[in-house]
Amino acid sequence: MTTTSEVGSVTVPGGDLAYEVLGGSTAPVLAIHGISSHRRLWSWLHAEAPELTLVTPDLRGRGDSVEVQGPYGLARHADDMTTVLDVLGLDRVPVVGMSMGGFVALELRHRHPERVASLTLVDGGFPLTPPPGLTPDNVESAFADRTGRLGRRWDRLDAYLEYFCSTTGQLLDPDDPLLRHYLDHDLRDGLVRLSADALVEDGRDTFFGDVPWRDVGVPVRWTHAEWSIGRESAPMYPADVVDMYAPQCVSVVALDGLDHAGTIMTVRGAQATAALLREALA
């Protein structure tokens, strides 16, 4: 389903961080997944734009990097990304980030501005308004669908697929082979490879941390979904919030009819991201 040029790992504080390079003909693009995700999130993008060369790490606490210890947080992830770039001999790259990955991308530009040529943010990156009642002390409540995956054994991929499509991925196609490919990377010995500590610490940083979104200094391209999880749910970025952040961007794409997961885990979402990355690489 994807062409793998290289699978490897880099040593970071706390362990060895895994990455995969999805080979293509373009200059490399660093692709940073979301808070409860992993590197196979970018399978849809590579399927729709196989010419893109994508450097796709598993962030610490996820996937093949699940045993990399904390501390977590956006700054730690941003510094990890520079280590990946160093090992691959990449000085300055376009960066795409989905959801929390967009926040990591902005933090990477803030902390290491010389490493980032442009930013493509997929339904993330710009500051979020916390849901009513959410505080730094109960941030895990915002991720009940994710924590519900943990601490139980999934003896069959089909059972995990059914749970995922009934919670986080309500509008995704359960018959999509790329979705099975994605979910298979979550599991080892029937357990989901996601650190609860990473989820909480990163969630707290994403909702309540300082986001360096003003005067980024490189072109920013942004897609945003109509809904968050499921049809008719409140979006992560309501219209008035989109209007506030849009002047910071050279391109803004509204993905009507898609929810948060669908912004990258569907053909249409992946095609929209691919179009923005082609702009960035041109």
Image (spheres, grey):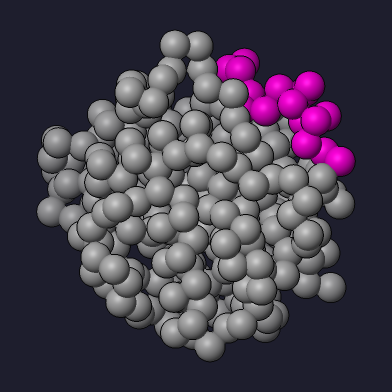
Q: Give x and y (percent) for residue 27.
A: 68, 81
What segment carries the magenta color? 230-247
In the foreground, 122 or 198: 198
> Which quadrant would residue 166 be assigned to in this image?
top left
- What's the residue at 44%, 75% (across, down)? 83
- What's the residue at 53%, 53% (across, down)? 104
> Which quadrant would residue 281 be assigned to in this image?
bottom right
Q: Give the vertical position of 24 relative to 155 (above or below).
A: below
- What's the residue at 84%, 73% (across, down)? 282
Left/right placement of residue 215 relative to residue 189 reads right
Q: Give x and y (percent) for residue 262.
A: 58, 39
> Which quadrant would residue 162 be assigned to in this image?
top left
Left/right placement of residue 243 relative to residue 62 reads right
Is residue 96 visible in the rendered image? The answer is no
- What's the residue at 17%, 41% (across, down)? 154
Q: Give the vertical position of 134 relative to 92 (above or below).
A: above
Q: Give the vertical position of 139 relative to 102 (above or below).
A: above
